[in-house]
Amino acid sequence: MKKVLILDANQRSALAVTRSLGKRGVIVVTADETTSSLAGSSRFSRENQCYPSPVTSPDEFIATISELIKSEKIDLILPMTELTSNLLLHNQDILPNNVQLPFPDLATIDSLSNKCALMKLAQSLAVPIPQTWFAENPDNLPVMLESLDYPIVLKPGKSWIQVEHTWLHTSVQLAKNPQHAKEILATDPAFSAHPFMLQECVPGHGQGIFAIYNNGKPIAFFSHQRLREKPPWGGVSVLSESTEIDPLLLKHAKSLLDAAHWHGVAMVEFKVDGDTPYLMEINTRFWGSLQLAIDAGVDFPWLLHQIAFSQPIEPVKDYKTGIRLRWLLGDLDHLYLVLKDKKTGLGNKLCAIARFLTPNLCTKHEVNRWGDLKPFAWEIKQYLRDLLK
């Protein structure tokens, strides 16, 4: 039986992978910076390991993972975040030769995960993107900030950048006016001497296509709709529903992934305004609402496991629509933010309470599951600890 090491075990995606593979008899070892973890609390995790912070101690992180692979006789390693994925790929020559890392080469990943490179690829393939201005650094803007229509989005090319010996997580910034844009560019290190973009702020709702490829060949696609997010005005999904795949979104997603000769999993994100889907980004790793796809019939972790070990794979052509996934504590935060918002009227607040309390037979809970309750107990403990802080 193969042995799998799942990193970033405090991610909900790690819990979904742990349950998926563990139920199929795969030996799962989980690991994170903390001595206990969300996925490590699952009954499907044989053991939970602790490693140094990949953010502040990347060299020590790699050394620890390398030793862990040897001591535990790991066959497959699955990182859940972009940082740990990149660190492993950049140091692949240090890792034991026998371990499988189910990703394409770094150049291929960078062509999709680097937002500047991705937008240029999309332009060449006639995939719609927001109006975009590329800038190599703050002193070389292609247009004067005063001439743009606001608000505008300032988007770093990479989600993680290295600053001296540590890694910095970048974020998208929304500038309200030229002065605000100048302040962001002057104070945020993500925009200092790093390629970045300025983009128009596109209205509409977020929608994604989730995919898995085997050396350029598509194996399965999945789509869902976000029903509630945290924060309510846009963020991580706390309630989502499996939906039919939009043919136009699928066309654009396939165009991008086919051009990259993709291998492994990916999430192609769009902002849909009217009839036009605008490309936002591509995540080259597992996503937060992964459990919904598994519940609907597309078991991405198991498919990736089969690909990694060259096992027979039958492409998935259909899945259940209308299945809902709820992250209960995230949904509680969503409700709190709605009730706290002074701009939200009383009627809307009462509706939010009713929606939160109304059960739905098609809804499955992401963390709290009867056959594996320890992760929910672990999550509640962390939630209360954070509230007390």
Image (cartoon, rainbow, N blue to C red):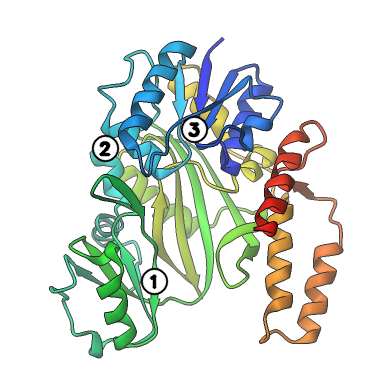
Among numbered discs 1 and 3, the one appearing first in the sequence: 3
Q: Are marks 3 and 2 in contact (CB under 8 Å)?
A: no
Badge 3 element: loop
Neighbor class of circle 1 (other Cα within 10 Å; few <14, some 14-19, many 20+) is some
Q: From where the camera sits, is residue 298 visible?
A: no
- Which residue is denoted by mark 1 in the rendering? 173
Position of residue 297 relative to residue 140, above or below, is above
- Of helix, strand and loop, which one carries label 2? helix
Q: Which residue is mark 2?
A: 106
331 horizontally vs 127: left or right:
right
Give the position of the C terminus as an image quadrant. bottom right
Residue 253 is situated, as x and y percent measured from the top left of the image, at 41, 52
Q: Is residue 285 left or right of residue 381?
A: left
Residue at coordinates 61% horizontally, 29% vertically from top-left? 18
Q: What residue do we see at 49% from left, 13% from top?
A: 72
Q: What amino acid is labelled 3 in the image?
A: Leu
Tell me the quadrant of the picture where the N terminus can be found: top right
The percent coordinates of residue 356 (x first, y second) are 80, 64
Three-letter amino acid code at disc 2?
Leu
The picture places residue 375, in percent across and down from the top left corner, at: 71, 37
The residue wearing badge 3 is 7
Q: How would you rate the neighbour count of disc 2 (Cα within 10 Å): few for under 14, some for 14-19, many for 20 or more? A: few
Give the amino acid at mark 1.
Gln
238 or 270: nearer the viewer: 238
Q: CA distance from mark 1 to mark 3?
A: 29 Å
